[in-house]
């Protein structure tokens, strides 16, 4: 799913995943359907050809989430990532994370 199709907090949905530090500060998490079937593309980047039908996750590059399988992420990223049982739950977690990190 392109970032523009996800629920993004704190900056425009079409903004790059890695924020330009001269334009933005803080964390910019977003909720997206749970990605499944992770694999590396020809350039070595993670890609996901499918999404979970009912589960959601939160992605935050500023926390060090590098995309790819959740079990390949740090414990803190895994806790934020979820999964969440609903879109509402994931959006709520992303909003809470944004509010918590914008003050730091």
Image (cartoon, rainbow, N blue to C red):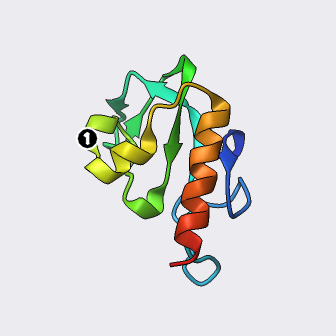
Q: Secondary structure at mark 1?
A: helix
State whether residue 76 is above or below residue 102: above
Q: Residue shown at 36%/28% (left/top)?
A: 38
Q: Nearer the viewer, residue 37 or 89?
A: 89
Q: Is residue 87 visible?
A: yes
Residue located beneath label 1 in the image: 72
* Viewport quadrant of the N terminus: top right
Q: Is residue 1 visible?
A: no
Residue 54 image offset from top left, x and y in percent: 58, 18
Q: Residue shown at 55%/25% (left/top)?
A: 85
Among the 4 quarters of the image, the one containing residue 88: top right
Residue furthest to the right: 12
Q: Nearer the viewer, residue 92 or 6?
A: 92
Crowd band around label 1 with a 10 angstrom C-alpha radius: few (<14), some (14–19), many (20+): few
State whether residue 85 is above or below residue 23: above
Q: Residue shown at 51%/31% (left/top)?
A: 84
Q: How many marks?
A: 1
Among the 4 quarters of the image, the one containing residue 81: top left
Among the 4 quarters of the image, the one containing residue 68: top left
Q: Nearer the viewer, residue 52 or 50?
A: 52
Residue furthest to the bottom: 22
State whether residue 20 is above or below residue 60: below
Residue furthest to the top: 53
Residue 6 image offset from top left, x and y in percent: 66, 41
Q: Residue shown at 65%/31% (left/top)?
A: 87
Residue 9 image offset from top left, x and y in percent: 67, 56
Left or right: where 83 falls relative to 103: left
């Amino acid at each position: 799913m392109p970032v523009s199709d996800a629920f993004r907090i704190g900056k425009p949905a079409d903004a790059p995943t890695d924020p330009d530090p001269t334009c933005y500060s803080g964390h910019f998490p977003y909720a997206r359907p749970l990605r499944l079937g992770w694999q590396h593309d020809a350039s070595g980047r993670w890609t996901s050809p499918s999404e979970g039908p009912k589960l959601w996750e939160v992605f935050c590059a500023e926390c060090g989430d590098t995309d790819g399988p959740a079990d390949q992420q740090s414990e803190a990223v895994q806790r934020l990532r979820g999964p969440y049982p609903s879109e509402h739950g994931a959006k709520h977690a992303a909003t809470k994370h944004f509010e918590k990190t914008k003050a730091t």
